[in-house]
Amino acid sequence: MEMIFKAAEALAELDEKETGLEYFETYMRYILTSGPKLTTEQLKTVIKELAVTYKKGSEVAMTLAEVLREEGRKEVRDIERYEAKKESLFDLAIDHLALKFGVLPTECQEKIASLDLKMLQIFNINIGNFKSIEDVKKFLAI
């Protein structure tokens, strides 16, 4: 946090205010994405301090913080969507295999659960080609 304040002071003194603001935005983006993660309280402290020492820097920090929060929320939504698709494909595979062969061995279920989304899609497409549990195990390399 101390480095953020020092950078803000130095950049506030630049003659070309827009260039200083651009440098500060780049610096803040780097700090917020690459350095140790600031807690919400630390970020609030930075924004309050900048509001006094470098008003435009405070605005940049608030905007970047919101952008990064939104990117984080999007990343979480993407992960949740991925996991939901994966779970759905897993359930579909287990249901089809159970209808075709009865109760599946635990090792098959565990191996299917470990597949990534693309492999689960390929696995589901191939279920119609399996003639026995041994074919399933062969596909799964068990």
Image (spheres, grey):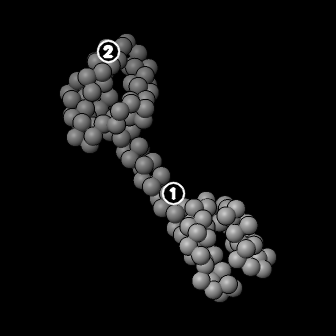
Q: Name the side, left or right, on which 39 lies relative to 69.
A: left
> Which quadrant is the C terminus positioned in?
bottom right
Q: From this view, report whether residue 138 is shown above or below residue 100.
A: above
Disc 2 residue type?
Ala
Is residue 95 or residue 43 the one in the foreground? 95
- Residue 96 quadrant: bottom right
Circles 2 and 1 in contact, beta carbons < 8 Å: no
Circle 1 Cα neighbour tier, 10 Å, few/some/many (<14 / 14–19 / ≥20) = few
Q: Position of residue 57 (x, y in %)?
A: 32, 28
Answer yes or no: is residue 83 visible.
yes
Query: Element under label 1?
Result: helix
Give the number of the disc on residue 78.
1
> Which quadrant is the N terminus positioned in?
top left
Residue at image coords 63%, 75%: 93
Residue at image coords 74%, 79%: 132
Is residue 16 or residue 4 the one in the foreground? 4
Q: CA gap, disc 2 to disc 1?
A: 39 Å
Q: Position of residue 39 (x, y in %)?
A: 27, 40
Residue at image coords 25%, 32%: 46
Answer yes or no: is residue 81 visible.
no
Q: Position of residue 67 (x, y in %)?
A: 41, 44
- Residue 56 quadrant: top left
Q: Name the side, left or right, on which 96 lies relative to 65.
A: right
Question: Pointer 2: what residue?
Answer: 10
Q: How many marks?
A: 2
Q: Nearer the viewer, mark 2 or mark 1?
A: 1
Q: Position of residue 112 (x, y in %)?
A: 61, 67
